[in-house]
Image (tube, grey):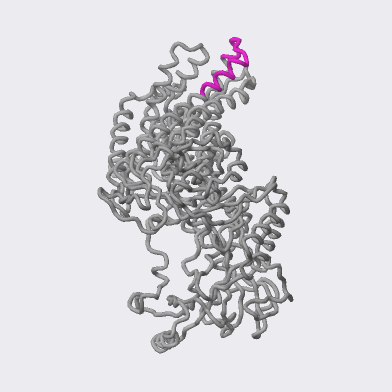
Amino acid sequence: MSTTLSERPLPVPARTRADGGGAPARRAVIRWAWRLFRREWRQQLLVLALITAAVLATVLAAAVSVNTPPPASTGFGTATDLATYHAPDPNLAAQLGALRRRFGRVEVIENEVLPVPGSVASYDLRAQSPRGAFSQPMLALVSGQFPAGPGQVALTRGLAADLGLRIGSQFSQGGVTRRVTGIVTNPQDTVDEFALVLPGQLRAPTQVTALFSAPGVSASAIGPNVQGIASARPANVINPETISVAAMTVGMLLVALVAAGGFTVLAQRRLRSLGMLQALGATDRHVRMVVRVNGAVVGAAGALAGAALAVAAWLACRPALEASAHHEIGTFALPWPVVAAAMVLAVAAAYGAAARPARQVTRIPVTASLAGRPLPPQPLHRSAVPGAALLAAALVLFALSAASGSGAQPDMLKLVLGLIALITSVVLLSPFGLTAVAALGRRAPVAVRLALRDLARYRSRSGPALAAISVGVLLAVVVSVLAASRYANVLDYAGPNLAGSQLVVYTPAGRGAPPPGAPAGAPTRKSAGSGPHAGSGPPEASPAAMARAARGIAAALGASDAIQLSSTDATLLRAAPGRNWHGAIYVATPQLLRAFGISAAAIRPDADILTMRPGLATTTKMQLLHGSGTGAPSPGGAGGFACPPSYCLAGPPIQQVTSLPSGTSAPNTVITEHAVRALGLKLTTAGWLIQAPHALTAGQISSAQSAAAAAGLVIETRSSVPSVATIINWATVLCIALALGILAMTVGLIRSEAAADLRTLTATGASPATRRTLTAVTAGALALTGAVLGTVAGYVSVAAWIWKSSFNGGLSALSSVPLANLLIIVVGLPLAAAAAGWLLAGREPPGLGRQPAG
C-alpha cells in the first residue's frame, strides 16, 4: 500500500536553544579557556605569583597568630576548673576536703616562690606528681628522669643554667640538699622556671593550686578563688582567629585589586581573539565565561601552590615559633578552617577580579574587538562622588565607634563598617588621583607627559593597582599613628629597659618586683615573693661591701666605673586624670652627670628635674611629691589633686637634657641636688649602673649574676621589650615592601601590554633613556599617588576615631605623629619606585619587526 505525500509525517524542526548552545557550548568555551591558560600561563605568571604569595602569607600569618597565644588549657591540664589558695592557711585542708567530697578527684600542686640568686627573677619550688590525674600536659621530661624520692629534684633548663647545675649535681635550698635527676619543662608554658619535687616535700608552700572538674557548675558558684577554663580567656571579638580572618579579607582585597588590572591587560591582549569568537556566534555570556573561567583557573592554581608552600614554610618555622611563643605547638597545628577559607577566597578574588574586564569586553562592538580598540574610560564622577561620600561615612562611623568613657570598649560593628567604607572609598577615589597627576604633568617633558596620560587614559588597568598601593599605605599609616599616639603621653614612658651594654646592680633595698623603673609587662620570669616564705639570699652585706662588689662587676665587664644610683622618696604626679608618672627618679649626682657628659654649666640653677623624655619639660600641672605625700595624693577640684605645700611642689622647673640615657630602668629622669637640698630629701643607694664598652654576652651576664648573688645583690639586663620606634619602623618597612611588590607586578603588566607602543617608539628613534623615563615615571607616579592618598585617608581616619574617644587624651595624642616615617612613605616610596623603574627598564623590546596577530 502506497503512501501519498500528504500522509507522510512532516519533519520536526530542531529546537532552538535560547541559552546559545546550552551545556555543550559552555563545555566548549570552558575547554577553550583552559587551553588558553595552558598556552599563555607565562603571560599570567605575575597574577599567579601574586595569588600564590597572598595565600602563602595569609595561611602563615594565620598560623602564627593563632598559635602564638598560650592555649586556653594553660594551667588547667586536663581539668576544667582550678582553685587557688594562698598559704599558709589553717583552713586549707578543710577546703580541699570539701572539694573532694563534692567533685571527687582533686589534684593538688604546691608552689614556693624563691629568688634566683643574683637576679631580679625568681622560680618555683614545685611539688607535683609526674603522673597526676590532671596535670600531665603541664609536665614533660626533656632528659634524665623524674624525681622518685625525697632526696631528688628535677630542674627546668633555664633554671639549671642560672644555677650552674646539671644532671647529677647537688641542689641546695633552705638547708636541704637534693640530687638533680632530670631536666623538665612545662609544655604549656616553656618560660615557667621551676624545680620539681614529689608531693609532700615542701615545708612552707606559698601557693596551692587544686585541679578538678565540675561539669555543669559555674566557677563563681563554687567559690571566689575558683576559675573555670571557659572563663580563663574571656570572649573577645579581637582574638587571633578574628584578626586572621580580617587580615585575610584585606589581603584578598588587595589581591583582587591588583589581579583586576592583570586580567584587564590579559583581556585587552585577547581582544581580537574574543572578537573572532563573537563573530563565530558566541554570545556575550560565552565571552564573559572565557575571562571568568580563566580567572577561576588562575585563582585555583595560585591557591593550591600557596597552600602547599605555606605548609612547607610552617614546618620550617614552627620550632622558632615555639621558642618565641613559649609553649609547645603541634606539627600540623594549622588553622585548617582559615586555610580552606583562604583558598576559597583566593579563587573568589581571582574570579571577581576577572568579572569586571569580562563585562567590559562584551560592551565592545565586534568590529572594534577585531581592530583591538578598547572602550574609552568611564566618566570620572561615577567613582569620585561615591568615593567621597563613603569617606565621609567612614569618618562618621569611626567617630561613633570610639569609646568615650573610662574603661569603655569601642563599638566593633561601627569600627568594622567604618574600615570597610574607608577601604572602598580609597578604591573609588584612586582613578581621580590618576587624573589629577596627569593634569599636573601637562607642562612636563614629552616622555613624562606620555606616561602620565597613559595612566589616566587606561584607568581600568592602573586604577586597581593604585588602590592596592593606597590600601597598603593606609594600613601602615594607621599602625604608625596609633602606636605613636598610644605613647604620646611622656608620663607613661615605654620601650627597652636598658641598652645592650648596660647593667644595673640593685641593693636589697632596690630589689623588688618589678625592679625600679621596669615597664609594666616586662618579660621577667616571675615576680620575686615578698612574704616570709619567699626565700632569701646570703646575709645582707655592708654598704661598703656592696659598693666594692658593684665596682668588681664593673671591672670584670671592662667598664670604667660603677655609677651610683641614689634615690629619694620623691615622685612626680600630674594633677589631671588619665595616665600618670611611670618610672624611677634618681638623683643627678656629679658622678652620674659626668658619666653622660653633662657639665654643671649646662644645668639651669633653678631646675629641679632633668629628663630626656621629650615633652615632659612643657607638660602642665606637674607636681613633685615628697615625704609623706608620696603615698596616696588627696583629690582636688576639677578632677585634679590637691598640692599641700608641706609635701608637694607645684610646677617644679623641668629641664630637658638629651644626654641622659633613654632606658626605662636607666636614669632617664633625675632630681637635681638643688631640689634635694631645698626639699630636705633623704638619699638612699638603690644600686649602680654599669656601662660596658660592648654589648654584654651571656657568659658575662652569668658571671655578673654569680658575683652579685655572693654579695646579696641582684642585677638587671636588657629585656626584649620593643620600642615604639621599632613598631613604627617595621610598619613603614612592610608598607614600602608591599607597595614596591605591587608596583613591580603592575609595571610589568603595563609594559607587557604596551610592548607594541614601545616597538613603535624604538622604531622611530626613541633612546633607552626615553624608555627608562616612561617606566620610571609610571612607577613613581603610581607610588606617589598611592602614598599621598593612603597617608591622608589613614591620618584623618585615626583622627576621627581619637577625636571622640578617651584614647590617651584625645586629639592631643596626635601631636607626636611620626613625621619622619610618614615622609619616608610619601617621599621615599616614590623615589625608590622611580629609581627601580629606571634601573630595570631600558632594554630594547625583542622582535621589533614582529607584530603579534592578537
Q: Between residues 537 and 523, which one lies in front from this camera angle?
A: 537
Q: Position of residue 32 (x, y in %)?
A: 50, 39
125 relative position to 478: left or right: right
Q: Position of residue 486 (x, y in %)?
A: 42, 45
- The residue furthest left is 637
Q: Between residues 59 and 618, which one lies in front from this camera angle?
A: 618
- Count up the numbered dots: 0
Q: Is residue 201 above or below residue 726?
A: below
Q: Quadrant of residue 98?
A: bottom left
* Residue 763 is inside the magenta segment: yes
Q: Position of residue 311 (x, y in %)?
A: 58, 55
Residue 353 appears in view? no
Q: Position of residue 349 (x, y in %)?
A: 44, 43
Helix, strand or loop for the magenta stretch, by majority: helix
598 relative position to 221: left or right: right
- At 63% across and 48% down in the image, what residue appears? 500
- At 65% across and 85% down in the image, what residue appears? 149
Residue 380 appears in view? yes
* Residue 185 is inside the magenta segment: no
Q: Is residue 58 above or below residue 35?
A: below
The residue segment tinted magenta is 761-779
